[in-house]
Image (cartoon, helix red, strand yellow):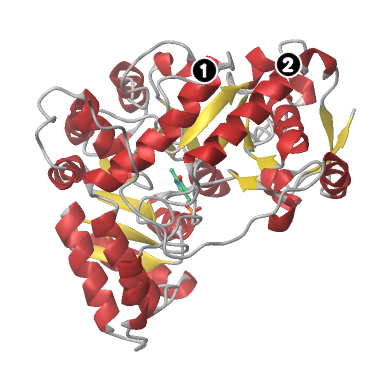
Amino acid sequence: MNLPFAESFKTKMVEPIRKSTRKEREKWIKEAKYNLFNLKSNQVFIDLLTDSGTGAMSDRQWSEMMLGDESYAGASSYYKLKNAIKEITGFDYFLPTHQGRAAENVLFSVLVKDGDLVPGNSHFDTTKGHIEFRKATAIDCTIDEAFDTIIKHPFKGNLDLVKLETVLKSNPVKKIPLIIVTVTCNSSGGQPVSMQNLKDVKNLADKYGIKVIFDSARFAENAYFIKKREKGYENKTIKEIVKEMFSYADGMTMSSKKDAIVNMGGFIGFREEELFKQASVFNIMFEGFITYGGMSGRDMNALAQGLYEGTEFDYLETRVEQVAYLGKKLDEYGVSVLKPFGGHAIFIDAKRFLPHLPKEEFVAQTLAVELYLEGGVRAVEIGAIMADRDPVSRKNRFPELELIRMAIPRRVYSNNHMDYVAACCANVMERSAEIKTGVKIQKEAPILRHFTVELERI
Ligand SMILES: *Cc1c(COP(=O)(O)O)cnc(C)c1O
């Protein structure tokens, strides 16, 4: 018989978690103004808010923590990380930052100016935030298939080359400082970008003399999908695939809290010394000296180790297959989930779940609240609240997809937890016709409002 799938790790330390009653949860979510970011973590049983910084470090990463060099300048931890980045990505220059958005802030301080255009594939919210904060515009050039939750396309993160070239052709090149390719594409559901598409985007960018920067938070999961789905890569190692992917970029921003399996950290990778030097000025201003940039030595050590572990096939298989396990369970229960399953998360199509709710009542947010009430499961809305208002008209933006994302922390939960989550979703679906009204906004911030928005039930 074929041997069944089993995790590529065993448990050495545990953290107890607590169930709660529906009555408690009703009180807590009301106090949290129906914003799941406002819940205390001990009010949550299974926390799928994000896979960012929530992973379990390995025994090797923890032992690296003890070897951290906390020298202000030129620490050995910096060089350890520099070597790991060079070995894994091929980039000669790098700057540590405290997390991914800090990398964006530093790099965009050099590259992005008022009135610029930044094309890419469904920019992540902080990326878009940092672009719009500089009065520039993010232009989404993702392929149309990405917006259909049912269509099976192996690389729904791909950029549409026609859309991209239209932007490049119809605007002055000096208004387009960079193209951002997000691997995997978080905002369109953790969907991968194919190697062919990375290559094509780079060729097109080169034709116009525009830089390509990878927003690389989940580059290793992207490589896993290339190995599984793209012809010619089935026999290559993840590390070989990763190297080739980055050969089609001029630089990268990284949220190390994702595929580098650390709880905090980020960096920027550069091919050219000149850009590195310009960015160094902003790094020193915003993050810290160039050999630590907001990270302690021990954290840089754990990150270096995490980059090696995060690009191992066995680890990635365990990770991505667990996400798919949850997806398949939900599918069996008839819950409408985005397909193919993403690398880090399962996305429920809230419009199909609650078809009777008008978009003005924030469909996905309503569903996320209901899921919490059902079983203490915390997911996150990726819909109209996260889409923010249009920076010019200040009107609510209503994206084509209203999703709730259930992101799976790395090496944290078992498949029993996945079964529990799937059962919660099935129960909410069973009573979905009784959910007659959604939520409305009481208070909101001018940008990235989803983190702090205050809501009430209609
Ligand atoms: C998480 C993430 C970021 C931002 O990184 P932080 O570490 O959260 O600041 C940027 N881009 C993508 C694709 C991400 O997933």
- Cα gap from disc 1 to disc 2, whole angstroms: 14 Å
Mark 2 neighbour density, 10 Å: few (under 14) some (14–19) many (20 or more):
few
Question: What's the residue type where badge 2 is placed?
Answer: Glu
- Residue, x 43% and y 76% (percent of image)? 288
- Would you say 332 lies left or right of 143 here? right
Q: Is residue 242 left or right of residue 20?
A: left
Q: Within 8 Å of ligand 1, the CB of disc 1?
A: no
Q: Quadrant of the C terminus?
A: top right
Of the residues shown, which amino acid type is indicated by label 1? Asp
* Residue 244 in the image, given as x and y percentages of width and height: 14, 41
Mark number, residue 430: 2
Question: Is 368 on the left or on the right of 285, as rendered?
Answer: right
Is 81 drawn above or below residue 213 in the view shown? below
User: Does the CB distance between marks 1 and 2 fall below 8 Å?
Assistant: no
One can see residue 278 in this view: no
Q: Secondary structure at mark 1?
A: helix
280 to 439, vertically: above or below: below
**Residue 246's x, y, as percent?**
20, 45
Residue located 62% across and 45% down the image:
46
Measuring from the top left, give residue 62's x and y in whole percent. Answer: 37, 72
Which element is circle 2 on?
helix
Q: Which residue ends up furthest to the front in the rendered image? A: 1
Q: Tell me the quarter of the picture where residue 214 sits.
A: top left
Of residues 376 and 179, which is closer to you in this image? Answer: 376
The reply, left or right, for residue 56 in relation to residue 397 is left
Mark 1 lies on residue: 331
Residue 399 versus residue 306: which sits nearer the camera? 306
Q: Quadrant of the N terminus?
A: top left
